[in-house]
Amino acid sequence: MTWTVRPSARGSDGRSHLKQTSDTFLDNAHEALQDANKVQFRDLLASFTPLVRDAAMDQFGQFENLRQHVKQLRQHSLENLDHYLTRFEQEAVQNGNRVHFAEDGDELNSIVLDICQQHNARHIAKGKSMVTEETGLNDYLKRAGLQVTETDLGEYIIQQAGETPSHIVGPALHKSAAEIRELFLEKHDLGERDLAETVDMVDEARQVLREHFLNAEVGIIGANALVAESGYSMLVTNEGNGDLCANLPNVLIICTTIDRLLPRAEDATAMLRLLVRSATGQPHTCYTSFYSGPRRVQDSDGPLETHIVLLDNRRTEILASDYSEMLQCIRCGACLNHCPIYAATGGHAYGWVYPGPMGSILTPLLTSLEQSSALPNACTSCGRCAEVCPADIPLPDLLRDLRHDETKQKLSPVRWRLGMRSHAWLARHPGLYRVVTGMGIFALHLLGRGKGSFSKLPLASGWTSQRDFPAPQGKTFMQQLAAIQREDKAREQKATRGKEKKPTARKPGKDGAGRSKERREPVLKEDWARKPDPENPKTAAPGKARAKPAASKKAKANPGGPRAKKPPQRQADD
Amino acid sequence: MTDSARARIFAAVRRASAGADADKIERELASFGKAPGASLPAADLCTAFLVNVLKNQGSADCVSNRSGAVKAVAEYLYQHFRSLRLVAGNDPHLAAMPWREAGVLPRFGKVEAGEPVTLSYALLGVAEIGGIVTLTGKANPAANNLLSDHHIVLVDSTRLVPDMEGAWEVIRKEIDKSGRPRGINFIAGPSSTADIEGQLVYGAHGPRHWHVILMGEQPENALEKARELAGL
């Protein structure tokens, strides 16, 4: 299914959402690159975070096996989501929860506010939750007069600074320690103090936030997984703030999405092995908690009332589309940490809640392609994100398909589309393509002979504004290949004629033609495909080697659909 | 919530789902087998558990029996607080400890804000994560895991399991016996954060110090060997 152009399902009333600036990604990115210190720090993080992830995976030793195991589980859960969602709801209700369903962000916000108001709550302690960033819950509750305090240190810092998260795991990683120090000195009325070290700032935040934990009437947390068989939800933190929110206030609200479901508790902890190593390079988080519902009669603490709000917000649409693999994302942030675009621009340039490769796919899917058409183009197709993605999501393929949808829906600039269309037409006429490119290359070769490169070039200002364009060396690849082929053919004919005349004169090893043929015979891809080697299973039946797996039910239901399901290409490439 | 939202979400999910029956779903799930796990740092379970506890920045003591455990608790308290007071959950295992032997003065119940040290009795120790499991309830108020500066955990060496799957096996039995607890808490180290410039700091919101006392039969010099393997 092509991702359709339509306005965001949310925000029509402008009530509660994070202002989206994804459409100005290029300007945002340009601006982000102006601060040399920030650029340097992002570079440092981009070199450091992959190292800790790689070290953890190397030590674990079975990344690929576990990734495939978890992928199977996630696929199975999503393919049978009706079964698991029904089961989860039954079990969660039996555990004493009230389970709510929200179709969009506004509905989630309204459900949460209703619960808070029913309890006359004024103070809300909130754990880290990207879902509530997505719905703009904090602003919504604040407008209703509630005091909402983010308790994850990173989230607390950006809340105090009036900013948004730049990373889905480390939301305040864009801020320097000096900036955070200034912020705390300004916001916390605690008299004169140095806050010279990071540990001092952490200690101060602990002291300030402890009061909020103890005073809050309602705690709000997210969930890293929902366990269908038992109705438990899994919460993973290092700070322990989420657990304090889940255990101290009298009312607990868990805000999460329907795609977090997994069948069994073991499946959640299997996923956890990948999640933690991919996110922070740790083998395990400090606190991994499973919560079933309100306090039992015999319990000495815990919330008296618990609610689970399950948000859809277009996820059922994604589930039914050819982008359904994106729902397998476990929100580890590894693709952000490995993305050269994210490293260069930082998270805010993406202009919405989810940055990096996963954000460049999720943002168009959760808002609209129209509002975020720059994001699928924020990709160098280097493939690092797909390599490290613990959910094995073919992120570059999905980004390419969004670009394809963009072109089809005429969202990309007219000039760009015309260029693509001309190129596509030319590529379908190989003879003409060779002539035209041959002429172009020759012309550039002549023009660039003196300097060897161009500092300005028509239609290529995107390149030449940043760096010189190297002048071509005279002939195209195809022209060079054809020349070699002609040369070889001539040698072969000469050798054959010589053989006919002097059949005994051929001296192996001294025959230039023989050596040359062995060394230089070009192997064209088409020839490789046409001439199967019976001893090589890959070439024995090339059709099979690159065959696509059975089409998905959705593809079957929509045989004329423009997109094929993604996995086959990866399989072939692997 | 509106019922119509629920109905619409379920209808959309059904349209996108495979429509398989429960038996088929169960069979497919069973066919995936067990997830690959992490290898343990030592062949012996006690040593492996201790290595990972130490790597998680926990501290550890090994004792052979309950008297030894009480003495170890007393030493820890005296060393850090020059006092022998602590708060412990109403766990029968803890109530039966010979506290008087070492002069320890436990208060049984839920920790109050400002009380610096709590003691929990772990349902399990999990070697794979170097962590312990507690179930919330009268025996283990959740606040006792979270609000104190120092969290001491007593782990019986017969209650060690190698991995998370082993832990779930025991937890399932416990649930069959006593019903689903409100919370199942895996704890693997003191609270920490790296939210400021990626610098790791211990003592974010939960305990700053996490001390594990492994009690019961265990290999000689297990702790020394664990320290060596943990590179300490």
Image (tube, coloured by chain):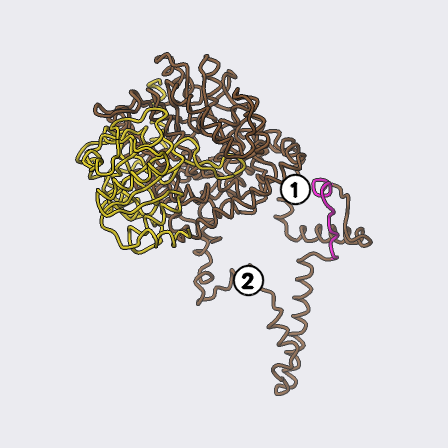
Furthest residue in direction right, as rendered: A450
> Which chain's colour is yellow?
B
Q: What stretch is highlighted in magenta?
A: A459-474
Q: Nearer the viewer, residue A49 or B191?
A: B191
Viewer-proximal residue, A508 or B9?
A: B9
- Say which residue label 2 marks: A527
Question: Which numbered dot is residue A324?
Answer: none
Check residue A471 for magenta coloring: yes
Q: In this view, does B74 lie to the left or right of A111?
A: left
Query: What amino acid does circle 2 point to?
Result: Asp
Find residue A149 and report its image quarter: top left
Residue B28, visible in the rendered structure: no
Pointer 1 and pointer 2: residues touching (CB < 8 Å)? no
For chain A, what colour was chosen?
brown
Q: Which chain letter goes with mark 1?
A: A
Q: Residue A446: where, in percent of width, then height?
A: 80, 53
Residue A11 sits above or below residue A469 on the image: above
* Mark 1 crowdedness (10 Å alpha carbons): few <14, some 14-19, many ≥20: few
Viewer-proximal residue among A84 and A530: A84
Q: Specify whether residue A442 is in view.
A: yes
Residues indicated by labels 1 and 2 sit on the same polypeptide chain: yes
Residue type indicated by callout 1: Ser
Query: Residue A210, how many percent across, how many down?
Result: 42, 24
Which residue is nearer to you in this view: B181 or A258?
A: B181
